[in-house]
Image (cartoon, rainbow, N blue to C red):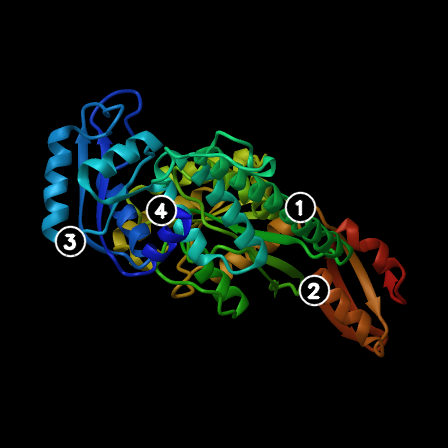
Amino acid sequence: MDNENERETSRSGDRALVLHPFLKRGAARSSRDPQACLAEAVSLTAAIALDVVHSEVVPLSAPKPGTLFGSGKLKEYADFIKANDIDVVIIDGQVSPVQQRNIERSIQCKVVDRSGLILEIFGDRAQTREGVLQVELAHLSYQRTRLVRSWTHLERQRGGAGFLGGPGESQLEIDRRLIDERIIKLKRQLETVVRTRELHRSKRKKVPYPIVALVGYTNAGKSTLFNRLTQSNVFAKDLLFATLDPTMRKIDLPGGQTVILSDTVGFISDLPTELVAAFRATLEEVLEADLIVHVRDITHTDTEAQKQDVFKVLKRLGIDVAEKDRYIEVLNKLDLLMDEEKEIILNECDRRDELLGMSAVTGEGVDEFLARVEVQITRNQKILIITIPPEDGASLSWIYRHGTVLEREDTDEGVELRVKFSPENLGRLEKMPVGIR
């Protein structure tokens, strides 16, 4: 299938031309900086090892229904492609199947739009069985709409036995039916994976550690922060979609309480609808979180627009970021700012409780971040005075893991602790051989 050809091309280091169409006026005109959008498109292209020979913003008065660009522009690109041995043209926008076919015919070169490019990246990065299944499902859903240009033999009519569709069924119909059958099979397999994930989720609830989920625009620094907090080695580079499959680790907060930290897939503007649907199960980990940490690249030109893109995805998941007790916003990459810019950001953080300045690379602000997480996680917990016999090390260890120790005093009678505990853990605590008041 064309799907396989696209994957082979994306890994070959072929030469690419990257174009960002930009509407100069009209209701559909984007508020984003076109040069920043182009830079993101170049990064997306580089993420699948394509060699970007040239990139440019293409101003449009209005998109042409059949070809997106005007005939003059297409002729110009056709000449450039031929002269520079371009293998693939990346169009940073949504291109209809008809437009894609017509552009390819005009410039005699393979065309991939933004959705197709993001799908290719996800295909390269998926590691777990769930990730691979989700990517394939999204890719097939996208490809199904592209059959109009994906096959050279669609004009042929094919007769045959009834199980092949019967006499006169076109090759297009056969291809679409085969894709539909594969999609149904993938959805069944994903249902099994989702049930397994829900089982793991229910097991975690029986050992009720609070869950802290890192979310944010792709390349905001979530995985770098995750690695610093957990001493892990999760793949973290200056790449878009460096993390695809969710990763979870236990960390200890300053007061001793253990929480589960979850690193999730990065969000992006104009995320293909096929991927939003396919990755809903993965993103639903965020729904279970006790605290959502939104990591932002505060140095990015479009950081505010990126923030709104993240909010849109969270809203589609049913998460209200207005719940300040459940939300922290980390303004990351302070190390890349000039002193004056950094001071402005930190002053803003001092004025707003939900904001926190940080550099995940240098570690600046990490201690304050952990303390803030602890305050948020324990906000509804009950404060107890607990006396533990000196020989009962097991109970002492359990209390440190599941509660937040505010004060400790060692006496002849044992260890006296002033501890915050969640309602979920009080029942287990009351069964222990300790004194509680």
According to the image, label 1 marks what residue? 191
Residue 192 appears left or right of 170:
right
Tell me how far mark 2 sits from mark 1, CA to CA.
Answer: 47 Å
* For discs 2 and 3, the disc positioned in front in the rendered view: 3
Tell which tag, 2 or 1, sits nearer the viewer.
1
**Which badge, 2 or 1, is on the more N-terminal residue?**
1
Residue 407 image label: 2
Quadrant of the rendering where the C terminus is positioned: bottom right
In three-dimensional space, the C-alpha distance between marks 2 and 3, rounded to whole angstroms, equals: 70 Å
Say which element carries label 2: strand
Residue 379 image position (x, y, % from top left):
66, 47
Amino acid tagged 3: Asp
Label 2, label 4: how many angstroms apart (C-alpha)?
54 Å
Where is 131 relative to 348, above or below?
below
Q: Position of residue 65 (x, y in %)?
A: 27, 23
Q: Quadrant of residue 51?
A: bottom left
Residue 296 image position (x, y, % from top left)? 41, 48
User: How would you rate the neighbour count of disc 3 (Cα within 10 Å): few for under 14, some for 14-19, many for 20 or more?
Assistant: few
The residue that mark 4 highlights is: 117
Mark 2 or mark 3: whose residue is earlier in sequence: 3
Which is more toward the observer, 93 or 105?
105
Could you say which quadrant of the image residue 162 lies in? top right
**SS of the residue under disc 1:** helix
Question: Which residue type does callout 4 highlight?
Answer: Leu
